[in-house]
Amino acid sequence: MSNNRLQGWNPQKTAFTYAKDREFGPGLRGAALYADLGLAEATGGQFHGEIIKMDPEKYTGEVTTGMHRHEYDLQFNYVLSGEIDFVIEGINDGPGDEKLLFGAGDTYMQESRILHDETRVSKDYSVMQVYGPAKATTQTVGQARAGGEVSDDWADKQAKMTVQRLQGWNKQTSTFTYAKDREFGPGLREANLYADLGVAKGTGGNFHAHLIKVNREKHTSQHTTGMHRHDYDFQFNYVISGEIDFVIEGFDETLTFRAGDTYFLPSKILHNETRITEDFQVLELYGPAKAGTVQLEAEVN
């Protein structure tokens, strides 16, 4: 892998969100509800993270966004539940082309500013989305309906924000992965297994995303990563299942994260994963794809 770094990073803050405390409110689309994951504050507006679900009071089964594009430099999604159908420019927008269908555990990364239309979402659809910058306009060129329109509240909120862009983005390609085809293999830690989510390929190495789970042939109850830091400029995690305990530079107590929780670690911060349960699984998004790890203490499997 090549080291494809972006320029212009803002100072970062550690940010955590907990599923038990999560609150949903209005956002981009009128028929959906959104829960903020703290990334805009943690990155000074360079990224935003959210969980999106359908608003049961506004869902009709006929929601479409119309063909539209976002002024995002990065857009990555992990489907938590339900289903969504897509038409995407240059991929399946021709006569007779089938719609792209994504379900629970699938991922999609759409290349920057590409036209797309969300033509169907199920009532139980929910998704974890990370995009940047946090302030970015949406241009609609097709007909949205049934709550798929951009909400006035969101437009007002965006108008009060300042655009915080990074420089040095590579040419992108839309990439998709499907839970049914997922394969895990070796990676950074012997006690873990990793499944690539195509983001390094899609961004030319600007970012990488993978799922991490326990390697039961290597993992023991004594496992710790040891205090270490990564040479990442960005590191965001969404816990899919199980539990993990962290010691993080600047925090006196051990922090525990469980299914549905998220944690964002500032660039190059020291941390130690001191306990993970056998059912632990996490989605990690970081950049650049090629970045070293400095161990201050030995890892224990």
Image: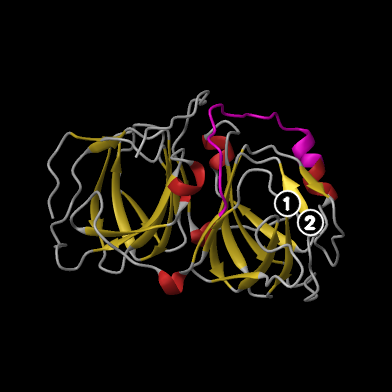
Q: Which residues are magenta?
A: 156-174
Return the x and y of residue 158 as percentages of the image width and height. 75, 38
Question: From the viewer's perspective, is 178 left or right of 242?
Answer: right
Q: Is residue 187 left or right of residue 132?
A: left
Q: Circle 1: is it few (<14), some (14-19), or many (20+) Cα within 10 Å?
A: many
Query: Disc 2 vs disc 1: Cβ atoms closer than 8 Å?
Result: yes
Q: Residue at x 42, y 71 (%)?
A: 181
Q: Does the stretch in magenta take in 239?
A: no
Which residue reaches farthest front?
A: 95
Instruction: Identify which residue, 164 or 271, lies in the foreground.
Output: 164
Quarter containing the C terminus: bottom left
The disc at residue 67 is 2
Q: Which numbered marker is on residue 115?
A: 1
Depicted 196 relative to depicted 9: above or below? below
Q: x%, y% of residue 186?
A: 24, 57
In the rendered image, residue 200, in percent from the top left (x then y), is placed at: 44, 46
The picture quadrant where one finds residue 179 is bottom left
**Looking at the picture, which amino acid does disc 2 mark?**
Met
Whichever of callouts 2 and 1 sits on the residue coming sooner in the sequence is 2
Q: Please tell me how crowded label 2 is: few (under 14), some (14-19), or many (20+) other residues with Cα within 10 Å.
A: many
Residue appearing at x 39%, y 68% in the figure: 182
